[in-house]
């Protein structure tokens, strides 16, 4: 039977997108990476000052090491900047990837050429239609086609909001420009963060910000936490020392041990508004002890992130109603009762599939609202795609893209 080569569109040049690009290069598949920023791993740069909890050996894939033999190894935990400088940026400049990454070209939408979301459900006709991508290129809008699409766009550019129940608090949208929604770097920034900082969130990003802001002598921290009695993500017998240290710091701050830190548990932001001087934000809180007002010089919202699902609103992607992740993978992860990120079970390609043939959500975005994602998990997902599509032999499909037989132990495709 005649062999056909697929063209792969990879959305995002972060760690998982780059690893997917390497897998395509190794397989000899034509591919293009579409990256919104002007360099690879831009979202990692956004939190580049933060040290990961996980060591080099969990953050560099086997493909990355094959292409970059001198990549760091061992148990030391890199910063985000270190990961970019030592691994991700050099990878993006290798001959295998150079010229295949289109920077400053975000994908605005993905569809099936000639088909709407509700048409040709589960048919070979839909599977044979090429994907059509709308690109916001530097010189204007463009379109492109692909026979396989890997959405590796991550979540960091789509933060959650402040209000009760996950919707914006009254006044939040009007004050959008006054709210910091990425993890702030405070090193040498005493003046930048002087005054009162209102911090919202309880996860590891918020804990990191609280630790760093509490160390600034000119900063007063008002920390708002939704849960009445947070466990701060403590893991019994934690094997990641940095994570355990952060949890211990959060617990100490919540105990009232720091004179410039107040932690409001069981509280939420009721509304935000400006005050007469225009320099501060009046934040009204609803707490377990009644209403409270905070005049904040700075507002930092670290309430989590979710991926941009509008990219594939015209595709037949079955999402979990609770997590927002693709249904098969979400069911597998929830079936494991959540658990620690280090103990998440390996999933096969069947769990990565959606009803839309040849479209996959990989990386942090694939976990939706679940906070159990590791880079190692994303690299394993790429392994599954590369192995599952190692044989291309169906000429009825554009590019002949069809997966080989599933591992019976992992089940079959939906």
Image (tube, rainbow, N blue to C red):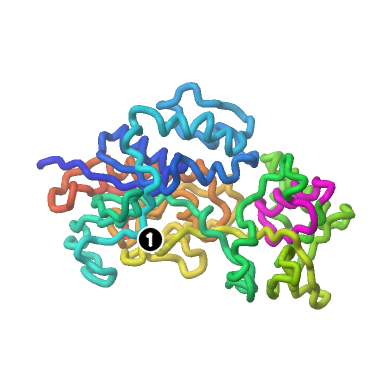
Residue 90: where, in percent of width, then height? 46, 29
Question: Residue shown at 45%/66% (left/top)?
Answer: 320
109 with respect to 327 (left or right): left
**What is the number of callouts on the image?**
1
Q: Residue at x 45, y 55 (%)?
A: 366
Pinpoint residue 198: horizontal percent, then vertical percent.
74, 61
Image quarter (top left, top right, bottom left or bottom right) of the N terminus: top left
Relative side of 168 to 13, left or right: right
Camera-side residue of 391 and 304: 304
Circle 1 is placed at which residue position? 311
Q: Is residue 46 magenta?
A: no
The residue drawn where x is 36% and y is 62% is 312
Residue 227 in sight from this viewpoint: no
Residue in the foreground of this view, choosing between 264 and 378: 264
155 shown above or below 172:
above
Q: Quadrant of residue 94?
A: top left
**From the viewer's perspective, is 171 left or right of 95?**
right
Q: Residues within 10 Å of mark 1 (few under 14, many from 20)?
A: some
Magenta region: 193-218
The image quadrant of residue 135 is: bottom left
């Amino acid at each position: 039977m005649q062999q056909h080569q697929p063209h792969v569109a990879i959305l995002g040049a972060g760690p998982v997108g780059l690893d997917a690009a390497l897998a395509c290069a190794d397989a000899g598949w034509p591919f293009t990476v579409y990256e919104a920023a002007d360099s690879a791993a831009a979202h990692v740069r956004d939190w580049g000052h933060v040290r990961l909890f996980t060591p080099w050996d969990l953050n560099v894939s086997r493909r990355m090491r094959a292409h970059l033999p001198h990549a760091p190894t061992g148990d030391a935990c890199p910063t985000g900047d270190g990961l970019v400088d030592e691994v991700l940026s050099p990878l993006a400049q290798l001959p295998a990837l150079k010229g295949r990454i289109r920077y400053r070209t975000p994908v605005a939408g993905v569809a099936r050429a000639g088909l709407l979301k509700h048409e040709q459900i589960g048919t070979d006709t839909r599977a044979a239609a090429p994907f059509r991508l709308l690109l916001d290129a530097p010189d204007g809008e463009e379109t492109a086609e692909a026979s396989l699409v890997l959405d590796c766009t991550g979540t960091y550019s789509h933060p959650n909001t402040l209000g009760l129940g996950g919707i914006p608090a009254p006044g939040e949208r009007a004050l959008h420009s006054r709210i910091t929604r990425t993890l702030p770097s405070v090193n040498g920034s005493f003046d930048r963060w002087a005054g009162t900082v209102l911090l919202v969130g309880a996860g590891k990003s918020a804990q990191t910000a609280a630790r760093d802001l509490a160390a600034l002598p000119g900063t007063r921290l008002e920390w708002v936490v939704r849960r009445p009695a947070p466990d701060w993500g403590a893991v019994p017998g934690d094997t990641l020392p940095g994570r355990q240290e952060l949890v211990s710091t959060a617990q100490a701050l919540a105990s009232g041990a720091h004179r410039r830190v107040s932690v409001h548990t069981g509280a939420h932001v009721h509304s935000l508004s400006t005050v007469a001087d225009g320099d501060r934000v009046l934040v009204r809180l609803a707490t377990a002890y009644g209403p409270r007002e905070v005049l904040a010089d700075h507002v930092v919202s670290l309430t989590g992130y979710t991926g941009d699902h509008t990219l594939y609103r015209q595709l037949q992607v079955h999402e979990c109603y609770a997590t927002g992740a693709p249904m098969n993978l979400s069911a597998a992860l929830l079936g494991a009762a959540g658990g620690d990120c280090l103990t998440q079970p390996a999933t096969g390609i069947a769990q990565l599939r959606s009803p839309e043939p040849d479209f996959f959500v990989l990386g942090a975005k694939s976990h939706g609202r679940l906070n159990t994602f590791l880079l190692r998990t994303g690299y394993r997902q790429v392994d599954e795609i590369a192995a599952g599509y190692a044989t291309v032999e169906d000429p009825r499909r554009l590019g002949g893209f069809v997966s080989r037989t599933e591992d019976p132990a992992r089940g079959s495709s939906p």
